Amino acid sequence: MDRQAVEQIVEAVGGKENIAAATHCVTRLRFALKDEGKVDKEKLENNDLVKGSFSANGQYQVVIGQGLVDKVYAEMVAITGIGEASKEEIKDAAAQNLNPLQRAIKTLADIFIPILPAIVTAGLLMGINNILTGKDIFFEGQAFIDVYTGWADFASIINLIANTAFVFLPGLIGWSAVNKFGGSPLLGIVLGLMLVHPDLLNAWGYGAAKEIPTWNLFGLTVEKVGYQGQVLPVLLASYVLAKMEIFLRKRIPDAFQLLTVAPIALLLTGFLSFIVIGPITFAIGNLITDGVVGIFDAVPAIGGLIYGGLYAPLVITGMHHTFLAVDLQLIGTIGGTFLWPMVALSNIAQGSAAFAMMFAEKDNEKLKGLSLTSAISAWLGITEPAMFGVNLRYKYPFISAIIGSAIAGIVITLRGVMAPSIGVGGLPAFLSIFTEFWGVFFIGMGIALVVPFVLTFIMAKTRKKKEA
């Protein structure tokens, strides 16, 4: 490890006196800085260890790369003497610099990011099920399991495992949300599972039900309806549960807390969930879904252009996390999402633009190596090295990627491409697309591969001619 290069990183972020807290994730150093104005971005990005840097959600993040970031962080701790902060501590320190909108977005991100592994895993398994059960993939007019019937139950079990995360989605959200709001995660799980209890009418059968079962609470009629696939009911109920638990813990003596706090908090939140929170948020969630679907149904080309083009800029601000909730709401309500496929194409477009820089800047050895590795990373769904290390640094590759992503978004949106789940982004994304849309999605992938590459290469050559 080059100790001097690490010392230069510390100097470039304003010195150790400017670091309030620091930690790292899989690829990035994450700083909570006292004054981001002291960062010397040019000096930082000229460092051989650094692949890019950016500010998001109150944190200044320096892209180092998988594996290497651990060594850089350990060396930085040895140089500065800063203690290793937990991710929660640095998030709390960084939150001091956020406005109310940024804090709301950060809250959603903190809730949904911990459950992403389960959702992505479900998407990949659904992809395997799609391959086995989709017609015209291996045999004309027939699915694999129609020809090899012995595989039918194998596919059925895969489907059950894949669907579990979505059937019990409120349980996952309840665990993460209550934990985020300061309550007991176990109570959050119970709350989420309570909202999809088998005794309730399944939300997916609500529209087709001839008669809605009800409770009669002393003259008040309450529908016995579950909230499968819904996001808003469990989010608001989790907030109420956590705040109620905190309120009770402050006022009930320690000796009685075990027998009183959880039962009272869960009972009151349960009644509020079925009487008030559930019906209101269920209606709001359906309005949001109908609004998004209505826009894409009315003017699909505009929807594809805007979302396909703007997704990458949203990543810079961190606002892309808010659309994860919309994706999950769409999956739970209409059985699939037309937004996530555009995210996968945006990943590919960023990788293609970075890859073009390897050929356009042949004389820059460091950039050539960074362009290749970051392009491969983006094509596999991890875009930070490509986006922040190459494309945003030179600007025109980023613009080229946006254009390619927008065109691809229009193409797949006009044909109604949908995914049953959120999966791995980049080139493997087709596995998580409904098989009947594979042909169109491959066309979209081709556009996202070719257009950004060609535009970036042309812009690079034009720029060099002007400089000459």
Image (spheres, rainbow, N blue to C red):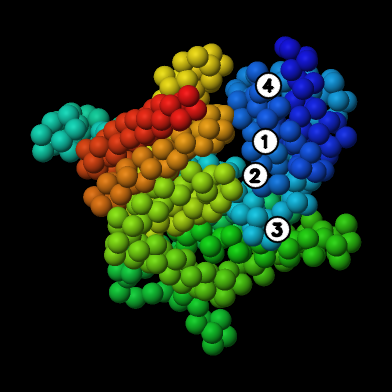
Count neighbours of disc 3 (C-alpha within 10 A) and say few if under 14, some if 14 to 19, many if 20 or more: few
Mark 2 and 3 residues: CB-CB less than 8 Å, in contact? Answer: no
Image quadrant holding the N terminus, namely: top right
- Element class at badge 4: loop
Amino acid type indicated by mark 4 = Asn
Amino acid type indicated by mark 3 = Asn
Residue 231 horizontal/vertical position (percent): 51, 58
In the image, residue 60 sits, relative to residue 204, either above or below, namely above
In the image, residue 441 sits, relative to residue 4, either above or below, namely below
Separation (CA) of disc 4 from disc 3: 31 Å
Separation (CA) of disc 2 from disc 3: 12 Å
To which quarter of the image does residue 73 belong?
A: top right
Q: Work out whether mark 4 precedes mark 3 in sequence or the reverse, and give the earlier one.
A: 4
To which quarter of the image does residue 182 belong?
A: bottom right
The residue at 84%/20% (across/down) is 78
Residue 4 horizontal/vertical position (percent): 78, 15
Mark 2 and 1 residues: CB-CB less than 8 Å, in contact? Answer: yes
- Element class at badge 2: strand
Separation (CA) of disc 1 from disc 4: 14 Å
Separation (CA) of disc 2 from disc 4: 21 Å
- Element class at badge 3: loop
The residue at 29%/39% (across/down) is 444
Q: Work out whether mark 2 precedes mark 1 in sequence or the reverse, and give the earlier one.
A: 2
Residue 99: image tag? 3
Residue 56: image tag? 2
Identify the residue under disc 1. 61
Identify the residue under disc 4. 47
Amino acid type indicated by mark 1 = Gln
